[in-house]
Image (cartoon, rainbow, N blue to C red):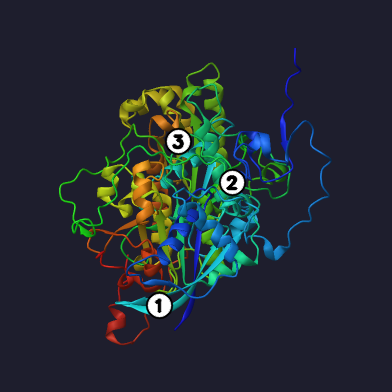
Amino acid sequence: MNPPLRPFRCLNGDCGFPHGGRCAREAEFADPAASCVELMRGEAPAAPAEIPAPKAEDLLPWSGQHFTTREGLALTRRGKTACIALIGPAGSGKTSLIASLFLQIANGRRPGLPLRFAGSRSLPALDRLIQKAAAWGGSAEQQIVDHTPVSAEPDPGTFLHLSLRPEEDRDAPVLEVLLSDVAGEHFAEWALESNEKTTTRLPFLPLCQEVMVLVDAHALQGEEGGTLDMDTAMVIRRLVQESRSWPRRPHLSLVYTKLDQILPREEIVLDAQLWKRLEDDSWRSVQAMLEARDDGMNAEVTGVAAFPCALAKGQPAGVTELFGAAITRINKQRPWARLELPVPAGGPSFLCVRRERP
Amino acid sequence: MTTRGIGVIGGPGAGKTAWLSALLEWVGGRGKRYLHYDGMSSNAQALRQLQLPLTRQQYPQRTPIESGLGLDVPLRTSGDHIPEVRFSLHVSDYAGEELNKKIFQERTWGDTWQNRSEQAALLIFVRIPHNEGKNSKESGDFVPLPRLQLQEPPDEDSPEAWGERVYRGQSRPPAPGVSSAVQVPTVLSLIEVLQALRHQRGLEGGERPEPASLRIGVVISAWDAMPQDWKDAGPTHYMQQELALLDDFLWSNFQAEDVRCFGLSSTGGDLNDPEYKIKYKKNPCGYVQWTDAFGRQQVVKDIAAPLYWALFGDRGLPDGSP
């Protein structure tokens, strides 16, 4: 019996033939396997000498990966920024929601989101997410996107970035949107105790105008649903307490994710009947939201189905509407305090009748 | 005469090589032309290699990555409404590999790319996304464009074939619905390059450059293989619906009159068809389609039309007379 063939190796670093792709010298050889002198079977020769790192001036000005908190803070100082925090335990769907949003924008399907794509400094990072989502076959047992790892670095990547431009027919400035993408484990620690250690990874929270607390609607119905509900309520209460000392209290949304796992896609309607059903499974979290409202926060409840099926089979539900509402609220906010000019005594009459515009 | 540079970029298999080959055939061809050679290229051997396949009525093969990362072709325009302008057509990375591998993934771009930021116009070649819900192919795994329908190229003797085509009551591609597939965008590396070139020019995100200072022509290659309803709707509608991310990016960052979408058939038909091969040998030509400012579809044989537009804007586009 012949021994099994050893795998192909190619000395040409740009060749994809050993991996089932195209030979880099395909134009020269009709049959690369037979003719290409760089292609061989077996172990590759010793690795070549280390390739020197590229010079700084040959690098693109941005890394294309997640923004650190420092980079995000610098961006907020340059122009109008929408900083949206997605909070929730591991597996609640934070990263999936971001991937789904980007896919909707990329497809030009933006119901409820009256802005158009103007750029992103995180395109390679977003590309990785959507490629992983594209490979998902639709099975609930498979992960749609990679789990966001816990990081021990002092200021690791935190935000994914999008620039969006209002689609109204005037030269409106772009809005820089920062979406937090942080491992859920950090929020669980922080909810239990807010100290220097637990807040090290979450310094961006006070910057955010919108906070979305995500909870897996399907998991709420499971055996650990009560525990999940309790933990979610704890996160909400921690948020309410901590935000009292922030420069501006964010708008708070409780977002039920994975609605497709409790309802068929075509039956997902965000109505009172659905809320009643969800409330029965998450009464602790709902109670915490009511307390948040009583504490003076703007709070609402909504739901999404970011990936109800494989990409080839249908569209998500509620994703662009969720972010569209958040961004619209942010867009209406004044980035600075209103300037109050005193009306001088004895001045010209027109100054006395000056009215402030709402 | 003024001298300008026009850049041509696009991913692997986007049709840059095929168009360049056909363009060189067209420039040196018979009949009325607005585009002429302006001296010899510094890389004449590479240009000859490019033209060889089409002289044999064969498609140019995929460009080997190590056979040169750039070409410069000196050209000039003249005739009728076309001003006399000398320019150099830069096809950087005409293998398309650097776009995805080096720039998008490794985040490196050398002087050649950085110097492109000073060019007056860019022609961006795109291939039809064919990855509905599936993994998009890596740069080394390009799948040839599907030729589902072999459309007869416009008959050059027919007066209705060229010039303005008004489609009334024609079928349009259906708008996507709830059960439609979510497309995975394939233009991210192109957008990244555009962002980098804009940054090199000192443009902020969303800042539109001065009119006519930087034109962007999007060229959708293999237009002859498109289904008829897309041909009827036109390349602009195609870009709005199927390349929405790129369309939005260009709308947000460039003047409306400085962005134009073209449907291009470099060879006018399928060279694998023996009958068409004979026809092509006698009269090699392709065609270009675009949507004009009034929403009408214009079709011309002159495959240099995107170049005229890149240089002169709408006034440079031919009127379609054969």
Q: Are marks 3 and 1 on the same chain?
A: yes
Q: Measure how far apart labels 3 and 1 are at the Cα level.
A: 44 Å
Determine the residue positioned at 43% across, 61% down. Answer: B25
**In the figure, B291 relative to A242: above or below?**
below
Identify the chain of the residue marked 1, using the numbered disc in the image. A
Q: Which element carries disc 1, helix, strand or loop?
A: loop
Question: Which residue is identified by label 3?
Answer: A255
Q: Which element carries disc 2, helix, strand or loop?
A: loop
Q: Position of residue A274 (x, y in %)?
A: 35, 27
Question: Which residue is identified by label 2?
Answer: A27
Q: Left or right: B5 with respect to B230?
A: right
Q: Are marks 3 and 1 in contact (CB under 8 Å)?
A: no
Question: Which residue is identified by label 1?
Answer: A342
Image quadrant for the N terminus of chain A?
Answer: top right
Identify the chain of the residue marked 3, using the numbered disc in the image. A
Q: Are marks 1 and 2 on the same chain?
A: yes
Q: In the image, which is nearer the foreground, mark 1 or mark 2?
A: 2
Q: Earlier in the sequence, mark 1 or mark 2?
A: 2
Q: Nearer the viewer, residue A350 or A199?
A: A199
Q: Earlier in the sequence, mark 3 or mark 1?
A: 3
Q: Are marks 3 and 2 on the same chain?
A: yes
Q: Residue furthest top?
A: A1
Q: Left or right: B94 with respect to B174?
A: right
Q: In the image, which is nearer the foreground, mark 3 or mark 2?
A: 2
Q: Residues within 10 Å of mark 1 (few under 14, many from 20)?
A: few
Q: Amino acid at mark 3?
A: Val
Q: Amino acid at mark 1?
A: Pro
